[in-house]
Amino acid sequence: MGFSIKLLPDNSTFTAEAGETIMETAKKHGHNLPLGCADGACGLCRGILLQGTVDHGRSTVIALTDEDKEAGLALFCCAIPTSDLVIQRREMVADWTILDWNGSME
Ligand code: FES
């Protein structure tokens, strides 16, 4: 059974298959989210969980602290949905420069 993922600000909804990360699912559905190491270490893929829960998988404390998790952040390259989700990605321009946010909730 899959889980529904609503991606903001795109306002797009797609379904994750069991065991897929948010990143894998988004890419499969044509969304190129910020991505660096793809291994839970750099933090470039950080996004916000507005609703729902995930298994943070192989994310490292270097890229995502317990406080980050409590604040609703997740590494989309590692996070596996455990419920339906509403998520927010970083804003980007074509050269992948991140425009709007430094990854903190402050
Ligand atoms: S891409 Fe590096 S932590 Fe996700």
Image (cartoon, helix red, strand yellow):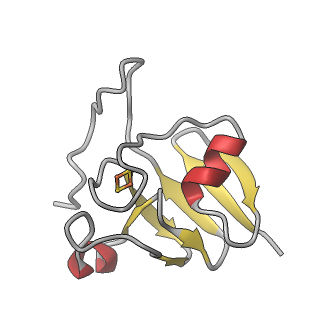
User: Residue 37: where, in percent of width, then height?
Assistant: 36, 48
Q: Where is residue 3 in the image (x, y as percent from the top left)?
A: 73, 69
Horizontally, residue 79 falls left or right of residue 95, namely: right
As drawn, is 17 to the left or to the right of 9? Answer: right
Residue at the spot 26% in from the left edge and 72% down from the top edge:
68
Furthest residue in direction top, as rendered? 94
Residue extending furthest toward the right: 1
In the figure, is residue 102 to the left or right of 93?
left
Image quadrant where residue 74 sits: bottom left
Q: Nearer the viewer, residue 62 or 46?
A: 62
Using the image, determine if residue 39 lies above or below residue 61: above
Number of on-image labels: 0
Q: Where is residue 41 in the image (x, y as percent from the top left)?
A: 29, 60
Q: Percent position (x, y) of residue 80? A: 57, 70
Nearer to the camera, 34 or 10:
34
- Residue found at x 25% / y 63%: 63
In the image, what residue occupies the spot 63% across and 47% down?
26
Residue 82's place in the image compared with 37, above or below, is below
Considering only vertical position in the picture, is 49 above or below 35?
below
For the C terminus, which image quadrant?
Answer: bottom left
Image quadrant holding the N terminus, namely bottom right
Q: Residue at x 39, y 55 (%)?
A: 47
